[in-house]
Amino acid sequence: QKEVEQNSGPLSVPEGAIASLNCTYSDRVSQSFFWYRQYSGKSPELIMSIYSNGDKEDGRFTAQLNKASQYVSLLIRDSQPSDSATYLCAVMDSSYKLIFGSGTRLLVRP
Amino acid sequence: EAGVVQSPRYKIIEKKQPVAFWCNPISGHNTLYWYRQNLGQGPELLIRYENEEAVDDSQLPKDRFSAERLKGVDSTLKIQPAELGDSAVYLCASSLGGGLAVNEQFFGPGTRLTVL
């Protein structure tokens, strides 16, 4: 059973801080990795995709991938109360199936 | 560009009744997905279409669930009869399909189903 593991949280950070969200996966041959943001009562919204080892930056978001350690992370700089949401890590397996973690709930305190 | 469209947004039915959900993907997206999301969990794939062909339906409970994607554009997911455990949010997503870089999936607003 291919798995994607996330800490359910909540992760609480003060406004302006860096929020660090982590994810591990079990399928070594996975090639594509995604972070989705999901506000309460809404559908998942794609915020980052990463395919190669290293860092990928987009505005206040940085995704980090380490395939050897089977580890993906998302850093949110200058966190804002509007970033409060559940962040879903998703990993695509060799059959192009997207496996989601259960999500980490982030709370940004004003 | 319009996003993925789903209807209805909410549905409340009695158990054993049928229900259907409709999805129209982003224009030009060949791949369409149906997911189910239970409270506190990530979405789980039910079925994936490449154009008209269902290429992965291994997670679809075929005794009560059915899906179709006629003409390779919009799609319908049906449950008959519904059970209490089917209460969940049903999400449709689409992607361009093809190679690695174009596998980003975009979700519609979902249909929240409540079975009483």
Image: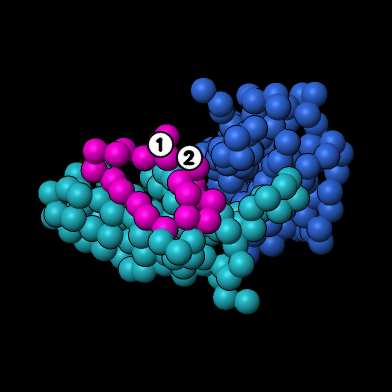
Chain colours: A blue, B cyan
Question: Which one is nearer the viewer's eye here, B92 or B75?
Answer: B75
Question: Which one is nearer the viewer's eye here, A15 or B27?
Answer: B27
> Which subunit holds the residue at mark 2?
B
Q: Is residue B116 located in the magenta-colored stretch of the structure?
A: no
Indicate the amino acid at tag 1: Gln
> In the structure shown, which secondary structural element does the residue marked by tag 2 occupy?
strand
Residue A28 position, x and y percent, is: 70, 24
Q: Residues within 10 Å of mark 2 (few under 14, many from 20)?
A: some
Residue A19 position, x and y percent, is: 72, 47
What residue does disc 1 label?
A: B59
| Range covered by the magenta-colored residues | B48-69
Res. B25 visible in picture:
yes
Q: Quadrant of the C terminus of chain A?
A: bottom right
Residue farthest to the bottom, as pictured = B1
Residue B56, which numbered label?
2
Residue B7 position, x and y percent, is: 36, 68
Res. A41 visible in picture:
no
Q: Residues within 10 Å of mark 1 (few under 14, many from 20)?
A: few
Which residue occupies 57% across, 39% down? A97
Which residue occupies 68% across, 50% down? B98
